[in-house]
Amino acid sequence: MDYFLLRDEVLFAEDVSLEEIALRHGTPCYVYSRATLERHFRAFDEALRGQKHLVCYAVKANGNLGVLDVLCRMGAGFDVVSIGELERVLAAGGKADKIIFSGVGKREDEMKRALEVGIRCFNVESESELCKLNAVAQGMAKKAPVALRLNPDVHPKTHPYIATGLKDSKFGIPISRAQEVYRLAKKMDFLEVMGVDCHIGSQLTELNAFREAAVGLKNLLETLAAEGMALRTVNIGGGIGIRYKDEEPPLPCAYAEMLKSVFGPENDYEMIVEPGRAIVGNAGVLLTRVEILKQADTVHFAVVDAGMNDLIRPALYGAWMDIVPVKKREDVEPKSWEVVGPICESTDFLGKERRLALKEGDLLAVRSAGAYAFSMSSNYNARPRAAEVMVDKNRHFLVRERETLPQLWANEHKLP
């Protein structure tokens, strides 16, 4: 469910016409719906009602301060993977004691800053990281709260680039070695071992893999408890997919019921979940304008002003994202178009074989562009990054100004 709806054949974000936003802020432009963000966060929060829990939004999906601000106001926790994401959350008003620090390659300066502000927990991914974190905490005379991220070797049935729980993934500690690593962590004087963590991948569309991973965690928790090591938190990660085309991902309520069925409806754990895409993915669209319509020998190209530097998912993952006209045309016949960008790469496309009625100058919306879209954008081909706008009912706010050309080289220097 989202709040991008047609009214009199024109696409609106809540109560604001996307035509109006494009005219005011130009294209390419990302547009987010506050009502959709709130609805999707609330779906997770309410699904876990009655269970001690924390919904930690995965900042890597979309770290715009406007997005983070909305979620801060709703009491969200946050999952970060860098000092930059940590500082973004703090700048948006997030509370440090609701921040989980994940990531396979944390630096010492990142650990120090996280300890300094008092984050809730580190998700630790290796013995080496345990030793490094213990030493950093000792130098600061603090105890570092930790959960071990385990790799359960579960196939998530998703794109291989976003599968993170297989035995050959770079993430996590093999679950077969979990007991010995927990014993090691318990011996370290400057670590507080709080729980267990697992994240098996992104854009998962069925519960079987989640259940398999959860059962593995529960069995481990029982084994550790029998040794006298009772852990308090279970972080099952994120990964629930969204509908881009015809997928039918599980609803948060079904996800929550699965967790309760595995761990028990009246368990004493704090359950932590880390959705990103499922909260923000369908809360955003990318507006782009048709610059050129071009006929090749066998195909028709619609060259738009957004390229793979703005939205790399189709080029990187072969991802399918819906492309729709902002205003429906009746004066031209629809035909099959390759919707491509201006970047000097053959991989620069937003969609292939899309049946659209188009004229040059038309405005298109790429749907489901709230997650892993702007956050993965770049300045390739010396292109300024797009503006970002947040819609709130009948108002809209510029939450990121479009980059200017001088900003592209503002931190560079010629030789003396």
Image (cartoon, rainbow, N blue to C red):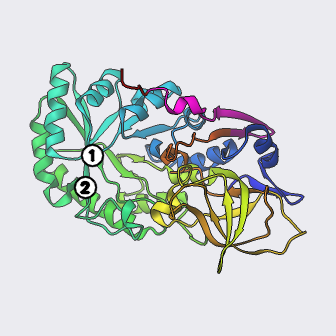
Mark 1 Cα within 10 Å, few/some/many (few <14, many 20+)? some
- In the image, taking residue 192 as reference, residue 304 lies left or right, namely right
Based on the picture, tell me whether residue 403 belongs to the magenta stretch. yes
Location of the N terminus (image quadrant): bottom right
Task: State how many labels appear.
Answer: 2
Amino acid carrying mark 2 in the image? Lys
Mark 2 Cα within 10 Å, few/some/many (few <14, many 20+)? few
**In the rendering, at what x and y percent does residue 198 appear?**
31, 53
Q: Residue at x 33, y 67 (%)?
A: 212
Q: Report the disc number at residue 104.
A: 1
The numbered mark, 1 or 2, whose residue comes first in the sequence reads 1
Above or below for 26 versus 175: above
Q: Secondary structure at mark 2?
A: loop
**In the rendering, at what x and y percent does residue 387 appear?**
64, 39
As measured in the structure, the alpha-carbon distance from the residue carrying label 1 to the one carrying label 2 is 8 Å
Q: Report the disc number at residue 170.
A: 2
The magenta segment:
390-411
Marks 1 & 2, CB-CB < 8 Å contact: yes
Q: Secondary structure at mark 1?
A: loop
Above or below for 230 versus 176: above
Q: Residue at x 19, y 25 (%)?
A: 137
